[in-house]
Image (tube, grey):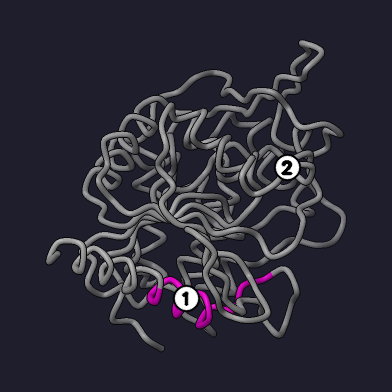
Amino acid sequence: MNKNGLNQYSHVVAIGGGHGLGRVLSALSFLGPKLTGIVTTTDNGGSTGRLRAESDCIAWGDLRNCLTQLAKRPSVGSLMFEYRFAGDSELTGHNLGNLMLMALDELCVRPLDAVNLVRNFLNIDTRLIPMSEEPTHLVALQACGQSVFGETNVDKMQDTPIALSLDPLVEATTEACDAIAEADLIILGPGSFLTSIMPPLLLPKIATALANSKAEVILIENLTKEPSPIANCSLSQKVNWCHQVLGLKIIDQILCHGETSYQQGNISYFPLRSSHHIGLHDRQALADALSYMVSQQLLNTSHQTES
């Protein structure tokens, strides 16, 4: 694996939701403590949704997914964290990792403390930070003027919403804003665009931190068309969504899957699909592609400076 391009960065930040963000973090885990994941916490489905309804806690599912993908395998710790209860009881369908995080949260001062305890337990160097430590839900505004409440309902919408918001509008985690301020490379995606990538950007302090950042920003496009209302949008429309929310253009480069490697403007195409699943990025291919992209960018910048 060619890691030279990425190793030259002192602080890489990746922003998104559980499955896509976890894949990126695991692909770049060789960066160790130089890598930080800022995790979306608006999920309200499955085990996470049940816990949120009963305890008014943050959404633990995406954090758990990232921790699981970063954990060294096989290990007792990773198996425990992935375990999902079967049978017919109140625990049926719950994920043990979610329950562990919630229990630790009740014992700790902050949700971030709970995440750090699990990181230490699973021997994970990469930092993980929830976008906020306060419970909030994603809300989409339809063209007809009606609102759709909750992440799971937003994903079921037929038409692309005209706007997104958080209810309530909570405070961003201070450490998340600090990580963005310190970053020299920021990665968005892959993952569900409306429900994984966009929620952190809706927090004013994170938006401000991104606006003030001098870091290179790369958006990773999904491998397949996602089953959500954003499926109607082109790649350029997604980029415009990000820029509209933030009030400025921040995305410098875009990484997409292609059967062959080539570049078209600021979009780079590489064979990225895993041989195991059409919807999963191959970790090594993803790391190599990102490393090549940033190396080329730094080379171009160096040539411009010299001339």
Q: Residue furthest front?
A: 307
**Would residue 116 be visible to someone looking at this image?**
no
Q: Could you say where residue 145 lies in the image, as x and y percent from the top left?
A: 76, 10
Residues rendered magenta in the picture: 280-292
Residue under the point 45% across and 66% down: 25
Residues at circles 1 and 2 in contact by the CB criterion of under 8 Å: no
Mark 2 residue element:
loop
Residue 159 placement, left or right of 141: right
Return the residue nearer the eye: 251 or 120. 251
Which quadrant is home to the C terminus? bottom left
70 is within the stretch colored magenta: no
Q: For this rendering, which residue is in front, 22 or 194?
A: 194
**Left or right: where does residue 224 sit relative to residue 306?**
right
Q: Quadrant of the N terminus?
A: bottom left
Type of amino acid under label 2:
Cys
Residue corresponding to mark 2? 233
Quadrant location of residue 120? bottom left
| Label 1 to label 2: alpha-carbon separation | 25 Å
Direction left: furthest residue:
306
Q: Secondary structure at mark 1?
A: helix
- Bin the neighbour count of mark 2 within 10 Å (Cα to Cα): few under 14, some 14-19, many 20 and up: few
Q: In the drawing, does residue 266 fall left or right of residue 36?
A: right
Observer-nearest of 160 and 47: 160
Residue sitting at 56 percent across and 27 percent down? 136
Q: Earlier in the sequence, mark 1 or mark 2?
A: 2
